[in-house]
Image (tube, rainbow, N blue to C red):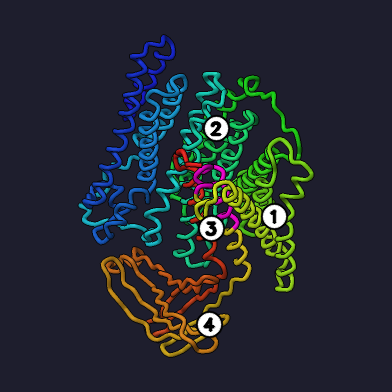
Amino acid sequence: SLGCAFLTFIALGFYLKNRDVRLYLMGRRLALAVSWLSIIATLILLNELIRNNFDVDYVAHYSSRATPFIYKITALWAGQSGSLLFWLSILSVYAIILIVQNKRRNVSLMPWVILITVSVQAFFLILINFVTNPFAPVEANFVVTDGNGLNPLLQNITMAIHPPMLYLGYVGFTIPFAFAMAALLTKDVSPLWIRSIRRWTLLTWMFLSAGIILGGWWAYQELGWGGYWAWDPVENASLMPWLTGTAFIHSIIIQEKKNMLKIWNMILIIVTFVLVIFGTFMTRSGVMSSVHAFTASSLGPIFLGYVFLVLVVSSALLVTRVPLLRSSNRIESFSSRESGFLFNNVVFVVLCFVVLWGTLFPVLTEAVQGTKITVGAPFFNQVNVPIGLVLLFLTGVGPLLAWRRTSRQGLIKNFSLPLVGALVALLVAVPLGLRRFVLVNVVLSTFVLVAIVEEFTRGVAARRRRHQESVWQALVRLIGKNRTRYGGYIAHLGIVIMFIGFAGKAFDQEKEFGLQAGQSDHVGQYRFTLNQIREEERTNHYAWIADLRVTDRDGNFVTNLHPEKRIYNFRNPNPNARQPNSELDIYNMLNMDIYSVFSGVDTEKQIAYLKIMLTPLIRWVWVGGYILILGTLISLWPSRRVSA
């Protein structure tokens, strides 16, 4: 595959020099070979994992005979070298789709697009071939008959979905970046490249959004702390390109409609791609301490060098093309939709910079002062929560503004109902004791929610007047006729609902205690009684299971919870090789989750040590995530003529 990559550079390089179409066809076919060979290599490694070929070092480290089949598959991206090969294979799938899809389109851009895409593949191929080979043989002077198995924290069904989704998002930004660079190199900065990558970008953004949400769900149900976002460096690594990618999606709408912000869009897609590579660097360099990160390796300097190379080359190219990117159009009014989009983008970029600064601060202080000063969640919450609330407000303001300029009458008409809704929310929330950011969150969420509902209501009412349709018919046809616009509103609705879920974090309750069979304790309005502790030996672990009965303050039965304390590799004679893990049990309700952790067991006294948390409104975080993805899917759905 690496050899074919170098041949692709040669063939397309000569094509760009003498324009012999045969060389272009050769380069395109070689690029397809690069991708197909990379995919075949990935399937071979997957086969070795399934067949338990412990002669391969990667298989011996991340799989075992007792590992369930589904987790043998997920072991493909559990380790350093395997995850890089998986990264490459996803880019290869994207590259094949790209080349086939553009067989007769974007003829002027495609040679450069292919060259840039293959250059990214070549970088990962060099790493896999010469630095961290997933097919390296095991280094042992004895026959390895079994492997270490997968980390217990990764033996969760969410981890079979979360990393692929995240990678589909991460890797997918390569394609818009390649088109942007091709547009700069060919000096064709017309809206052609924007139209070519709009769906690519939206699809990529959707996968990245789903990956982040699934990562939060995994943390919530696996790590035992009752939260879903800890501002961990690796979490931040996925959030930063999401922020700039979101800004890019909003910004290209203005370029398509008004031929403005062309320089801004180039900067955003360059920064997004650089952050993707930088995030990959952070998880593999060992410079960041994280439960999500891989161990320290020699990849760090190589990745960092590649980040700087991409940043320097793309920035230099952008600077030389600035005269071509200048637009004669200008934002005419502060009260225009263009202005709202621009403010929205600026806030996204500011938030990204804050996250980047907080993430790198410990590394910078250690490099400069020799002492690592850790920046924790309190810093991120204190700085980012207000910025996030500003973004929430702008989410509601955007749809209420008109293109070019919003008249005074339009401002009064569009803002009246949302402001009334926000005022009502304020009058209801203050007596309930809500204060500070929670109060602002509730008021702004109501403002945005009313603004979005108002947009749908007006559209439905207009269709009903014109076509005598039912409410349901009018709603479906309204969305179908302008999927991009109303799909975006639905995605915004999902974000509002997520913010409502975020507000519940301020009211979490937590308590830790030990119980013997028959004893009970209470947390909030619920009482927890331990019926018994059961023991069970399973294929790849030994488990103690707590049987908890949950009742409310009136003694009414609510649910039974069965959290577990597990020991993986329990048959291993070496105690250090055994891996303890707590398997949670969560009871979901509409307004609250009851969250139980079996943190430890005293086998002699038969005492179960438990942590119980009550997490209000957290379900709405996940519901909002589903709605966000639904809205994005609607925006992505191919347009078709809808009967008027």
Residue receiving disc 1: 386
Mark 2–mark 1 CB contact (< 8 Å): no
- Amino acid type of the residue that numbered disc 1 sits on in the rendered structure: Pro
Marks 2 and 1 sit apart, C-alpha to C-alpha, by: 32 Å
- Amino acid type of the residue that numbered disc 4 sits on in the rendered structure: Tyr
Q: Please identify the quarter of the rendering in which residue 330 is found.
A: top right
Q: Quadrant of the N terminus?
A: top left
Marks 3 and 4 sit apart, C-alpha to C-alpha, by: 27 Å
Q: Dot 3: within a 10 Å radius of its alpha carbon, few (fewer than 14), some, or many (20 or more) residues? A: many
- Residue range (magenta): 477-496
Marks 3 and 2 sit apart, C-alpha to C-alpha, by: 37 Å
In the image, which disc is placed on residue 526? 4
Q: Please identify the quarter of the rendering in which residue 88 is found.
A: top left
State whether residue 126 appears in this view.
Answer: no
Residue receiving disc 2: 308
Marks 2 and 4 sit apart, C-alpha to C-alpha, by: 55 Å
